[in-house]
Amino acid sequence: MLKRLWGSYGHFIFALILVVLNLIFNWLTKTMAPRYQMASSLDRFIPFSKVFIVPYLLWFAYIIVVPVYLGLKSKIQFIQFNTFVVLGQLVCMLFYFIYPNGQNLRPDVMSNDIFSRTILAIYKNNPFSYTAPSIHVLYSLAAYIGLMKYEPFNKKRIPSALSFIFMVISILSTLFIKQHTVTDIIFGLLLSALLYVLVYKLIPGRKNCNAVKSV
């Protein structure tokens, strides 16, 4: 029975690597101060909008539910998702170490409504350091790509469209609540594009070539 369970769900242990990486990331944000600011003139044109805290918070559920769903439905897609985010997070942390950066866009939130109180709590517990490349963008795209690569989900038009819309809104939410800068987002998109080529094109292509040679 244990052997059968391991064969069916053993790949979930892969996610423990992400737990370790996030612990290291949290330590990094608390021990190293940023020396370079990533804010640009473009960020000054983006208004602060507290309602975007809703998709920002839903993102945390999104990046948990999607990999669990993939892990239950497709071992291959689960491993590719985790490979994508593990490699991406390692690159991000290496960049943070070499080029410690942050942003100084956070406004003084004076209102006492639920949105404002939630944003203040996030500001307090989430440092404004190590923002570029954006890990938020990395996970958002990894989750969306993982869903699109799982063919039974990809064939469902409405869920696929909703997933894309949420992915875009969740990324934009980081700009509107001043958690990230435009530069952070661009760096995150570029990194994700490179990882997509590596994880979903180059690595499978190399495996296929090796399989052909061994025949």
Image (cartoon, rainbow, N blue to C red):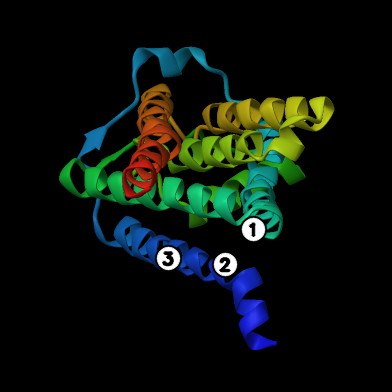
Which residue was labeled with disc 2? 12
> Residue 63: x, y in percent?
61, 49
**Residue visible at 66% across and 40% down in the picture:** 150
In the image, is residue 159 above or below residue 15? above
Tell me the distance, in whole angstroms, between the alpha carbons under discs 1 and 2: 7 Å
Q: What amino acid is at disc 2?
A: Phe
Element class at badge 1: helix
- Evaluate whether residue 104 shows in this view: no
**Residue visible at 48% across and 53% down in the picture:** 82
Please tell me how crowded label 3 is: few (under 14), some (14-19), or many (20+) other residues with Cα within 10 Å: few
Image quadrant in which the N terminus is located? bottom right
Q: What amino acid is at disc 1?
A: Gly
- Evaluate whether residue 158 shows in this view: yes
Tell me the distance, in whole angstroms, between the alpha carbons under discs 2 and 3: 10 Å
Which residue was labeled with disc 1? 71
- Sequence-wise first label, 3 or 1: 3
- Closer to us: mark 3 or mark 1? 1
Please tell me how crowded label 2 is: few (under 14), some (14-19), or many (20+) other residues with Cα within 10 Å: some
Q: What amino acid is at disc 3?
A: Ile
Name the residue furthest left.
Answer: 98
In the image, is residue 102 above or below residue 30? above
Q: Is residue 156 left or right of residue 102?
A: right
In the image, is residue 45 above or below residue 70? above
Q: Is residue 173 left or right of residue 206?
A: right
- Which residue is more in the foreground, 200 or 53? 200
- Which residue is more in the foreground, 50 or 157? 157
Tell me the distance, in whole angstroms, between the alpha carbons under discs 3 and 1: 15 Å
- Closer to us: mark 2 or mark 3? 2
